[in-house]
Image: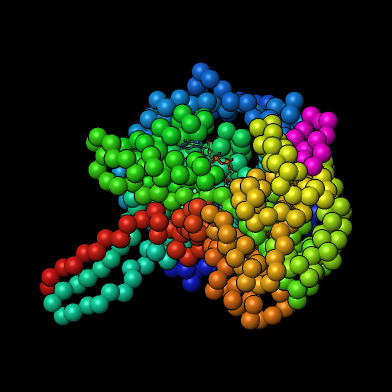
Amino acid sequence: MTAKITREDQLPPFANEPFSDFSKPHVRAAMEAALAQVGSELGREYPAYIGGQKVTATQKIRSIDPSCSSRLVGIVQDCPPELGDLAVQAALGAFESWSLVPAPERCEIFFRAKELLRQRRFEFNAWIIYEVGKNWAEADADVAEMVDFFDYYCRSMIRLNQPPELVQVSEEKNRLAYIPLGVGVCISPWNFPCAIMGGMAAAAAVAGNTVVSKPSEDAPVVATKLVELMIEAGVPAGVLNLVTGTGAALGAHLVRHPKVRFVSFTGSREVGCQVVENAAKVSDGQRWLKRVVAEMGGKNAIIVADDADLDSAAQGVTAAAFGYQGQKCSACSRVVVFDSVHDRFVEKLLAATRALTVGPAQDPSTNVGPVISGRAYEKVFHYIQLGKEEGKLLMGGERTESDGFFVPPTIFDEVRPGARIAQEEIFGPVLAVIRARDYDHALEIANGTAFGLTGAVYSSSPDRLERAAREFHVGNLYLNRKCTGAMVGRHPFGGFNMSGTDSKTGGPDYLLQFTQAKTVCAKI
Ligand code: NAD
């Protein structure tokens, strides 16, 4: 099906990979079987991959299950900077040949990776459930998104490979081609261990670059599994190198490396700013300015107006605030409610939130699993403590005795727009309810942080919704629906301001960032 595709119209129209329906007994049984199988494979050690070779380091990183912290998911290499150098060298060598491989052949490999991932859907779901504590549906959506990314970025590359039309005159022949940049370092977070890690690497590689991937210390096993899958699909040695290790030592070293041509980063605002700064310094022997694509944090708001469907708003806010424990960059952490409907809305919000079950991610009935780590757990409780001073605790907020890092969905009311819990990214299941006098005030509050990633408005007024489209300054705005759950191809994703460079993953222009355009004019 995938061979010799040179034009997009040779493919059926793009369609998002459907989510699994776990209410069907056979789908549920398949997921249970995958959890049992992966459960029997926990605790193994994985190598790094450099130039097609399996490599080990002296120091190791232990990846644990956040639902049960005594359970070891796997052991990976804590690669020192020297192994990072070797990986850059391998990528540099492979760039010579990979950049010359015709785009349709590169795409063939990633289309194959897409099919392999579809076949191993439940196995990948299970690794995600164990390693980062996503519940079944969230894990399944992560893998489906990666299937979409493989497909979408191959199609984007096929399109980019068609020369665009230029103005031609009688005495010359003009053309323009999008060529790859060189070696890229892809630094990914743990919260979409499949889709973000894999999407960044696949986009860069299918565009003809070679990649050094440095995944998060908190999700290295899923990253290793996905790199192994891409190698199995036929990605040649050195095109995709995997070095696991710490951000401060290995990540920062890779960003500074003079042979690195671009950095594709997704993570927190703090680290993103360091990456931008480090990449901007030109080192000895460096022959280019590094390009940086940085996707960072959010402090996303949902506005609930006085003419909103309050039931729908309460459902949407609950899902956006507490889905994956509030650990999505797109998560709602502020709800800005008109004074006049505040009490009625809050009542519905509390009812919807009370219906959520907290528990281990492996349990199919769990809505809210653990936060990623002991460090995250302490950080979230630090903010909960602060919230008790800055707002009125409506529900949640208590610690539980457990081997897992469980934080109950927590809601603070009567929060001032400038309070720290309304300004800083907490990245946990903590929601601030903020009152607004009217729509002007609500928009002012919503726009009143340093971030600009996602946002939503619930209102039945077309004028208000249109005004939000103009004035609510975020990369991804949703009207009368939740602010999480961006779909590849439908909702190109990326944020404004301190949320990043607005790269729009899963959008028609994403791949351009990993290419440079070359113009050739021949006199005739
Ligand atoms: P993080 O910034 O702590 O780490 C991200 C990656 O950077 C990791 O691989 C880490 O090892 C590495 N790193 C750390 N220090 C580094 C340094 N000095 N130099 C180079 N690399 C370094 O983020 P996280 O905790 O893994 O992920 C959560 C954050 O990511 C949240 O802020 C979330 O909003 C953000 N995020 C954003 C998006 C988006 O699309 N905008 C998507 C997912 C997550």
Q: Please tell me which residue is depicted at 50% across the width and 59% down the height of the picture.
A: 496
Compared across the picture, whether 120 is left or right of 14 comes to: right
Counting the numbered discs, the total is 0
Image quarter for ligand 1: top right
- Asked if one can make out residue 73 in the rendered structure from this viewpoint, the answer is no
Compared across the picture, whether 146 is left or right of 24 comes to: left
The relative height of residue 87 versus residue 329 in the rendered view (above or below) is: above
Compared across the picture, whether 11 is left or right of 277 comes to: right
Compared across the picture, whether 376 is left or right of 469 comes to: right
- Asked if one can make out residue 132 in the rendered structure from this viewpoint, the answer is yes
Identify the image quadrant of the C terminus. bottom left
**x and y percentages locating residue 17 in the rendered image:** 65, 60
Identify the image quadrant of the N terminus. bottom right
The answer to whether residue 403 is magenta is yes
The answer to whether residue 166 is magenta is no
**x and y percentages locating residue 343 in the rendered image:** 83, 64
The span picked out in magenta is 397-407
Q: Nearer the viewer, residue 268 or 53?
A: 268
